[in-house]
Image: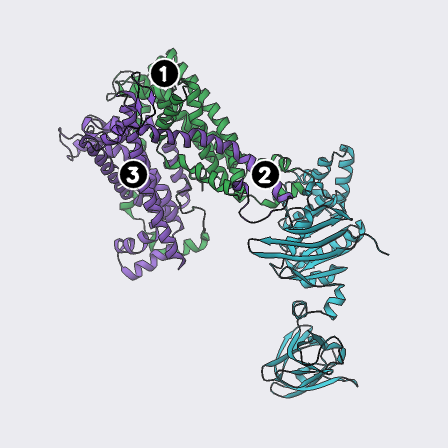
Chain colours: A cyan, B green, C purple
């Protein structure tokens, strides 16, 4: 199955003055996917989105929508719609007129406009507020208007620029679920820009992690979290225990500390400097299984945070690992050790990742 | 006027509670300062009051009030020359308002959005009238018209007033345009509007209060202006302000008090209206209309 | 064409580029209008300053330094010196008036602050001529001000304001003091009251506090006000006409005279250029001052 991607970026760059905001980006976004562009601020994710939307000219490369080159087309000639970070609602128009704006531009018949706007306001649960002005709405409601205003046009691709960034945490969680539901319902390709890795992980079918204008890794949420391809991805997605060392024949000799067994890697030459990453929740403190890498360290600190507890264990001078344990009914570590004590811990070899 | 960096009045606003709590000793009413301010207000309004008062004088004197009368207003109403001048002034103000608002709003939009060298050059040209005294602009305009062989008339006053007013409109509007969220215009285009439609359907409605306020302000300023008008007017019914100027120079006629009072009242109303317009739209109104901040 | 190139490099023909093109079209009419009427006319003044006139008084182009050379005539240098003196004196008086007024309103105006400032600004932007005329009536020999002063013994029968330098400066101050009040008010409003209190603790008296704390903190506002007052005061001719006599004429009156009564246009143009020169020097001085201030602030 080789369907035409909904969005394709071919060698797209954006240069400002003397620096690249986006550097030779190649990217395919499959139709119907919820696709996230994830990265820290200034990584080029919004610039990429703006080039797809037509608000910014690429310095080099082409933007293709459903196989058609739209690089030179203005936003109004592209079959995409955008939900802006600031929502960018038209303050002088009512909610209905805001949502109807795109359909009116397209010359859709009045009755049809009324029907579709009504449906859409229902979908985003704003049917009672049709005649209000945007200024009188709450942040969450304005967000829904922005979404309805874009979706009502049934674009091939919906671009969302950090649409939840301005909402408080609780509302944000709720909107994440709703957005995902709406996306499934309408079946439109969503391209979602965010700097929040939790948000990207919960909502996306695929994620592209960006850094300094380049894509570091592109894959499913699980892929990206479980098998980060680079040091940057490992540290940006959740917390990672990153250690530096030298690879030699299935082992990494840490710069500070012991050698860790990582299994043979044909793609890494002996003697090359590498990073090793172990997720805190992949480290065991008891009930070890056979075949695990086992190490000893000194317990330096415990941080209790409700359902979980984080332990800081010093493996070697300057190398402290954090270990995350669920606070189940069964085991609380404080009952077992106190600070300064030597503790044993371990992980399955496959959870110890070597990053070139 | 933004050329001169006025410290912005709306910059960090202190939280009211904190201000009140911190006031403490500084809040002791300084009698001397209050007296000076009161005296200032007295002297500020005294001349206006004098003109208004003596416009209702039944006598011809400017120093002795003989009793209330509408005599000078009646004289004005029957003075065909002055009435013709009033008409000229109104026409000049209307044309100058329309012309300068049209050109000024477009210029303000272009200046803010266009980051080219031409844009910076236009920004500099736009500032020239604000640092040139009116007498220089007046002399220059007159010489230009003479040089081009254009006879001075009501039309030349209109042209000169438009030239001078564009800067005002642009300065007022430019800060408003800069304060607009650029994503709103992009949103309109995203929804199928062309660039021009986005400006017409979204940007201009958002600027409407400021545009109206600047239009009213320009109307009042042009109506009141006499330096430019004085240098560029012909002999066809001269603008009212030029008439007043001649009258004041060559012996005082009490009619001028009546005309002056009407003009003062008119422009005070218009300027107050210009300050108030943004509030009608639920925006923050205020002096920034006048200072261009 | 080089002018149309955006300063940030983006060579592609795309949405950005078409946007720039449209905004250029927005800008063009106003810019061309201003260039055609204003810049061209200012250039014309400069050209005419070295030109001549024909018998009918129409301007003639040429190169004749008679107008420029005439500026050295003591009669004109005296007027220039007087204008400068009056304008600077006006600036000083405006500063003296505006500080207490702006300070009182900004720090003690309470919720009437905005209303009070509007009460100053609104009449100031209303008809200048009528206001000046009213002011001349107030200052006249048997006007309300002198009568009041005589009543309290501060003036005698011979005291005059009109037809003196005092009268001209009073007129200029009345005309332009608002340009000092607005920037000062804005600066004082921003001033943190706790600064003044700290000053009271450090320096004691309110006068010392004013000179060591308030004044330095509002220096930029005062500088802006000085320029805003100096510009129109230097070019004014109404005040000298209404409040002054033949011995008080300013450069504006001379210019007006050369164009209307004397019909000596080259000389009038030369005087106009001289006025512009003085103002430009003032502006440049101000800009250098603020640049320096900003540079220091950044450090």
In the rendered view, tell whether residue A264 sits above or below residue B241: below
Residue B190 falls in which quadrant of the image? top right
Q: Chain of mark 1?
A: B
Visible residue check, residue B42: no
Q: Nearer the viewer, mark 2 or mark 1?
A: 2
Circle on res. B94: none
Q: Are marks 2 and 3 on the same chain?
A: yes
Residue C222, position as x, y percentages in the image = 33, 46
Q: Are marks 2 and 1 on the same chain?
A: no
B104 left or right of A58?
Answer: left
In the rendered view, tell whether residue B13 sits above or below residue A38: above
From the viewer's side, name the closer residue of C115 and A292: A292
Label located before the other in sequence (2 or 3): 2
Q: Are marks 2 and 1 in contact (CB under 8 Å)?
A: no
Residue designated by label 2: C21
Q: Chain of mark 2?
A: C
Q: Are marks 2 and 3 in contact (CB under 8 Å)?
A: no
Q: Chain of mark 3?
A: C
From the viewer's side, name the closer residue of A350 and A333: A350
Q: CA distance from mark 2 to mark 1?
A: 55 Å
* 10 Å crowding of disc 1: few (<14), some (14-19), many (20+): many
Q: Mark 2: which secondary structure?
A: helix
Q: CA distance from mark 1 to mark 3?
A: 44 Å
Residue designated by label 1: B73
Who's the residue at 76% across and 32% down the image? A110
Circle on res. C278: 3
Residue C298, position as x, y percentages in the image = 41, 57
Extreme right residue here?
Answer: A1
Visible residue check, residue A69: yes
Q: CA distance from mark 2 to mark 3?
A: 39 Å
């Amino acid at each position: 199955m080789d369907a035409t991607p909904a969005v394709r970026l071919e060698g797209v760059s954006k240069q400002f003055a003397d620096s690249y905001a986006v550097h030779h980006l190649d990217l395919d976004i499959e139709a119907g996917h919820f696709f996230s562009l994830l990265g820290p601020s200034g990584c080029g994710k919004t610039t990429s989105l703006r080039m797809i939307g037509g608000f910014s000219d690429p310095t080099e490369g082409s933007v293709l929508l459903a196989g058609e080159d739209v690089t030179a087309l203005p936003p109004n000639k592209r079959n995409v719609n955008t939900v802006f970070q600031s929502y960018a609602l038209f303050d002088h128009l009512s909610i209905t007129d805001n949502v109807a704006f795109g359909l009116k531009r397209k010359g859709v018949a009045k009755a049809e406009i009324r029907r579709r706007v009504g449906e859409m306001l229902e979908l985003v649960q704003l049917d009672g507020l049709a005649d209000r002005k945007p200024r009188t709405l709450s942040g969450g409601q304005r967000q829904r208007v922005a979404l309805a205003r874009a979706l009502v046009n049934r674009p091939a691709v919906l671009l969302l620029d950090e649409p939840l960034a301005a909402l408080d945490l609780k509302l944000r969680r709720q909107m994440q679920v709703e957005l995902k539901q709406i996306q499934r319902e309408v079946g439109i390709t969503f391209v979602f820009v965010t700097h929040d890795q939790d948000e990207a992980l919960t909502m996306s079918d695929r994620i592209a992690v960006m850094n300094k204008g380049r894509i570091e890794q592109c894959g499913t949420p699980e892929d990206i979290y479980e098998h980060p391809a680079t040091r940057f991805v490992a540290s940006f997605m959740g917390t990672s225990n990153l250690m530096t060392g030298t690879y030699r024949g299935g082992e990494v000799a840490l710069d500070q500390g012991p050698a860790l067994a990582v299994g043979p890697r044909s793609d890494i030459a002996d003697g090359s400097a590498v990073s090793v990453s172990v997720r805190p929740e992949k480290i065991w403190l008891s009930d070890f299984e056979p075949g695990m890498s086992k190490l000893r360290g000194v317990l330096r600190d415990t941080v209790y945070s409700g359902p979980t507890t984080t332990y800081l264990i010093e493996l070697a001078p300057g190398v402290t690992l954090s270990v995350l344990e669920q606070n189940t009914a069964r085991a609380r570590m404080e009952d077992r050790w106190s600070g300064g004590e030597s503790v044993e811990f371990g992980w399955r070899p496959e959870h110890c990742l070597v990053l070139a | 006027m933004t050329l001169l960096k006025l410290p912005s009045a709306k910059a960090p606003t202190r939280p009211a509670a904190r201000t009140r709590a911190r006031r403490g000793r500084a809040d002791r009413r300084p009698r001397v300062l209050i007296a000076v301010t009161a005296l200032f207000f007295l002297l500020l309004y005294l001349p206006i009051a004098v003109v208004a008062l003596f416009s209702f004088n039944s006598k011809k004197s400017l120093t002795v009030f003989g009793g209330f009368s509408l005599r000078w207003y009646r004289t004005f109403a029957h003075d065909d020359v002055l009435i013709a001048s009033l008409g000229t002034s109104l026409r000049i103000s209307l044309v100058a308002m329309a012309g300068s608002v049209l050109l000024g709003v477009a210029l303000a939009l272009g200046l803010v959005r266009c980051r080219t060298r031409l844009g910076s050059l236009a920004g500099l040209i736009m500032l020239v009238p604000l640092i040139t005294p009116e007498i220089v602009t007046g002399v220059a305009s007159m010489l230009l018209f003479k040089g081009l062989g254009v006879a001075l008339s009501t039309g030349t006053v209109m042209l000169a007033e438009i030239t001078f007013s564009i800067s005002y409109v642009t300065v007022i509007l430019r800060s408003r345009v800069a304060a607009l969220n650029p994503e709103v215009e992009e949103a309109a285009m995203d929804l199928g509007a062309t660039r021009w439609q986005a400006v017409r359907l979204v940007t201009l409605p958002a600027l409407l209060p400021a545009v109206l306020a600047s239009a009213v302000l320009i109307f009042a300023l042009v109506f009141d202006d006499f330096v430019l008008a004085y240098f560029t007017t012909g002999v066809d019914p001269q603008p009212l302000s030029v008439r007043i100027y001649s009258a004041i120079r060559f012996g005082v006629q009490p009619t001028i008090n009546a005309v002056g009072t009407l003009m003062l009242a008119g422009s005070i109303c218009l300027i107050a209206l210009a300050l108030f317009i943004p509030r009608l739209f639920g925006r923050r109104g205020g002096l920034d209309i006048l200072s261009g901040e | 064409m080089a002018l149309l190139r955006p300063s940030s490099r983006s060579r592609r023909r795309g949405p950005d580029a078409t946007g720039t093109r449209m905004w250029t079209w927005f800008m063009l009419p106003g810019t061309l209008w201003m260039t055609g009427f204003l810049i061209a006319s200012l250039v014309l003044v400069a050209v005419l300053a070295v030109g001549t006139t024909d018998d009918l008084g129409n301007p003639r182009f040429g190169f004749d330094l008679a107008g420029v050379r005439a500026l050295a005539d003591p009669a004109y240098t005296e007027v220039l010196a007087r204008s400068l003196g009056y304008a600077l004196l006006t600036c000083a008086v405006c500063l003296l008036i505006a500080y207490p007024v702006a300070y009182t309103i900004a720090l003690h105006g309470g919720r009437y602050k905005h209303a009070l400032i509007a009460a100053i600004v609104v009449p100031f932007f209303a008809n200048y001529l009528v206001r000046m005329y009213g002011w001349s009536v107030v200052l006249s020999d048997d006007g309300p001000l002198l009568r009041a002063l005589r009543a309290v013994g501060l003036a005698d029968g011979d005291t005059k304001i009109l037809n003196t330098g005092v009268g001209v400066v009073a007129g200029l101050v009345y005309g332009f003091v608002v340009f000092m009040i607005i920037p000062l008010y804005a600066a004082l409003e921003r001033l943190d009251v706790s600064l003044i209190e700290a000053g009271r603790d450090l320096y004691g008296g309110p006068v010392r506090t004013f000179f060591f704390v308030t004044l330095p903190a509002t220096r930029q506002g005062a500088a802006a006000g000085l320029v805003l007052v100096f510009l129109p005061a230097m070019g004014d001719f109404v005040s000298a006409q209404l409040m002054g006599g033949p011995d008080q004429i300013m450069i504006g009156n001379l210019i007006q005279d050369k164009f209307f009564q004397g019909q000596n246009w080259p000389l009038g143009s030369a005087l106009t250029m001289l006025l512009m020169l003085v103002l430009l020097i003032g502006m440049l001085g101000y800009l250098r001052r603020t640049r320096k201030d900003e540079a220091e602030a950044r450090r």
